[in-house]
Image (cartoon, coloured by chain):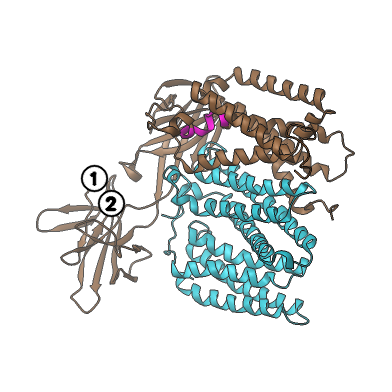
Chain colours: A cyan, B brown
Amino acid sequence: MSWDQFIYFAMGALLLWGTGAALAYGPKRKIISTLFTLGGLMLFFAFIAGLWVSLERPPLRTMGETRLWYSFFLPVAGLLTYLRWNYRWILSFTTILSAVFIMVNLLNPDIHNKVLMPALQSPWFAPHVIIYMFSYAILGAVTLIAIYYLIRGKRIKEPARIMEMTDNLVYAGTACITLGMLMGAIWAKEAWGHYWSWDPKETWAAITWIGYLIYIHYRLKRSSSNKIAMVILIIAFVMLQICWYGVNYLPSAKQSIHTYSS
Amino acid sequence: MKNSSRHIWEQPWGYREGILIAAGIGLSGLILQLFLGNIHPTLFAAPLNLIIGALFMTGLLAVYLLARKRPLGRWLTSVAATLPALALFLLLSIFLGVIPQFPSGSETALPDNLFTSLGWYRMTTSWPFVLICFYLLLILGLTTLRHTTRKQEWRDIGFYLNHLGLFIALLGGVLGSADMERLTMRVQEGQVEWRGTTATGALKELPLAIQLDSFLLEEYPPKLVVIEHESGRMLPTERPESYMFEGVGKTTDLAGYTVEILEFLPHAAIFSNDSITRVVPMLMEGATAALRVRVTPEGGAAPKEGWVSNGSYLYPHSLLRIDETRSLAMPLQEVKRYTSHVTLYTEEGHTRKSLIEVNHPVMMEEWMIYQYSYDDTMGKYSDTSVFELVRDPWLKVVYTGIFMLLAGALFLFFAGPKKSRS
């Protein structure tokens, strides 16, 4: 399996996810749209697994490979949210965002490359990156909800219920970025000699984390405004994007030992 | 901020006071920074860090005991105090994440501009950053203490794991940062070394010695690329392609050419003069990898056949010229793993054989020994291994905090937010 075959799997998965998302708006929707979404996930994961086998290493090293996992986890987060909270629009949102990242990978494909540098050959590699990609997907879904909330404004029917859903997702997402960050710290101690070196990637991981901590603590105050809470979420997600790939374009990036894409 | 009739500094305090106090701390830090410059790392070295830590803990307890029932004590553990402090820390972290940083020990001259005066090139030792850190620790510590006076329920486990865990990890990290020692040590095969070099180049004798029994370096299979020999650039320029050797007889498309692999010598010697190049198998130190290939251009031009090699310290690399402007080349092979077989000795006379490689450090006499580097001019024939030795007496403290936080994160994931609102 190589990137050349990606388009078939991606288009197949998107078709299934799109159908699942569309069916969610119809009657008797829950089971059938879940099945379609799961089908798409299986197809998409078959590609990830095939790539893993053919590369002889976990496909988690390059930016394109992390985007691959992100495109996979977005519908996972969407499906879990849909099953738990029943909002029929969430699946279409996550499918569209997933499609955006699939398009980036199609227009800007990675080069087939088996090389895994010694620093990445560690049992921490896969869990560290996978849990980060999973949390990015949950927090991506949350950002879509925040944008939806701000655009709908006064027309939002049950703001308290949406806020409850948002809180739940943010707690789950923040828990996962905490796990990812601390696994990274323990791994860094094993690989680089120190658990925290303020490498630009680490700094931005901390910034992102603080962003979501601000949301969580802001929401603890009963008098807090829903709108401001949603704006905090959008800003935190911008920080997250900088942490993920934006950091490569910053002046500080020259010193980073955290770049593997070459 | 709802009760707009309340004047500023009038109790009960809210966000306004929180913003002003955080800004005040930032400003005090700024003034200290302008007059004193960055905090010298040795200010936190033992035993001063222990004293600062003890003073801080005493101060924390004193504030807690004296002010817990007063409005100030309540306010200091409130969201209105926490959020502005977090926001200011976030802002300074953004500067830290954008502006290139200079290591604090080095003597390199900093650029002569405003950022230098503000301490932003060494943000983590600048006064505003450190003061805000301690202010956050104060709030975190007080909030944790205050929480113990509540009626406890099972959810509080998560609260303590996260807040106390972060407090321990942060305080341990800040106070322990200057006690950490990092040395590098070069050892040649067959030799014993017991001195390390610090970042500033000073030699330090260690309570342990490393004997390098052997150093092994494994490489990925060789790769082929098409280059422009004027510029040396890989083609196609916008997205360079490469092909990793997978076996003799395979054919691949590479930058518009068909490349067929005819022969592979993992250990070869190359003899060449002006007219001919001879490549022969030779199992010896300094041998190089070589591939014999046939390159066929698109459009039916005559194929070219010949050897390509990436050379070694003994032999120069050799290209296969395809046409006027282009050649087939073999870049240096990428390193798969490198390993040092060592014998470790302590002053007490203990001996231990170990294997050290990247991601697999070895602990000996309080020192973690890491595989750091090797003699890269010799590549896989390097007989020198470079180790990094790290001692961090505060690691156990920080790890206690980190593991509490890990458990707290799992708790957060499964328990979710409190359901009692709405």
Residue labelled with disc 1 = B314
Measured as percent of width and height from the top left, residue B26 is found at: 59, 31
> Is residue B382 placed above or below B141 in the rendered structure?
below
Amino acid, disc 2: Thr
Assess whether residue B230 is covered by the magenta stretch: no
Measured as percent of width and height from the top left, residue B263 is found at: 28, 64
Q: Chain of mark 2?
A: B
* Residue count near mark 1 (Cα–Cα under 10 Å), binned few <14, some 14–19, many ≥20: few
Magenta residues (range): B120-128
- For residue B130, which numbered disc appears in the image? none
Residue labelled with disc 2 = B288
Measured as percent of width and height from the top left, residue A184 is found at: 58, 45
Q: Chain of mark 1?
A: B
Assess whether residue B127 is covered by the magenta stretch: yes
Q: Give the main secondary structure of the magenta stretch.
A: helix
> Is residue A146 placed above or below B28 in the rendered structure?
below
Cα distance, mark 2 to mark 1?
A: 8 Å
Say what secondary structure mark 2 lies in: strand
